[in-house]
């Protein structure tokens, strides 16, 4: 897996995912959303997004995203996370 390419894709996809409203993200709890795509290198990637309450219901959301290429990286995917406040701002 091209780590630089994977990090770039993950950052872009996480940014797009967190552009959703707070209420839409709350509705996705506890489901995992999976997206498959092909990078410029031709590598096939799978990205998983999960949303959880950060500390308590109706509070901040913890948004986790991970990416792998289906190889050994599937056991230790690259990941990133963000926290969204109820007003929609990201921390």
Image (spheres, rainbow, N blue to C red):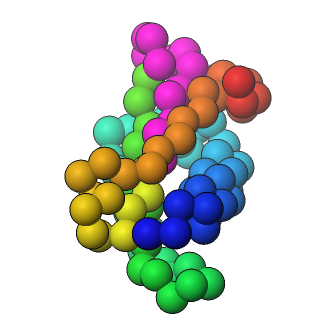
Inspect this view and state whether residue 33 appears: no
> Residue 85 colored magenta?
no
Quick one: 32 or 44, which is closer to the camera? 44
Above or below: residue 25 compared with residue 71: above
What residue is at 47 percent from the left and 45 percent from the top? 79
Quick one: 27 or 6, which is closer to the camera? 6
Residue 48 found in image quarter: bottom left
Q: Quadrant of the C terminus?
A: top right
Inspect this view and state whether residue 44 appears: yes
Residue 9 found in image quarter: bottom right
Above or below: residue 78 compared with residue 82: below
What residue is at 32 percent from the left and 59 percent from the top? 73
What residue is at 27 percent from the left and 69 percent from the top? 71
Q: Is residue 46 left or right of residue 80?
A: left
- Residue 69 image offset from top left, x and y in percent: 37, 70
Above or below: residue 54 compared with residue 20: above
User: How many callouts does the rendering have?
Assistant: 0
What residue is at 44 percent from the left and 23 percent from the top? 53
Q: Is residue 53 left or right of residue 73?
A: right
- Residue 68 image offset from top left, x and y in percent: 38, 62
Above or below: residue 84 compared with residue 45: above
Seen from this angle, which residue lies furthest top? 56
Q: Quadrant of the N terminus?
A: bottom left
- Residue 72 image offset from top left, x and y in percent: 25, 62
- Residue 17 image offset from top left, x and y in percent: 60, 53
- Magenta segment boundaries in residue numbering: 54-65
């Amino acid at each position: 897996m091209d780590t630089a390419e994977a990090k770039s894709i993950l950052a872009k996809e996480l940014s797009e995912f967190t552009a959703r409203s707070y209420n839409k993200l709350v509705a996705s709890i506890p489901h995992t959303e999976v997206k498959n795509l092909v990078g410029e290198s031709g590598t096939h990637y799978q990205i998983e997004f999960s949303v959880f309450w950060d500390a308590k219901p109706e509070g901040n959301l913890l948004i986790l995203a991970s990416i792998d290429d289906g190889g050994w990286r599937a056991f230790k995917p690259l990941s990133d996370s963000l926290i969204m406040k109820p007003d929609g701002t990201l921390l």
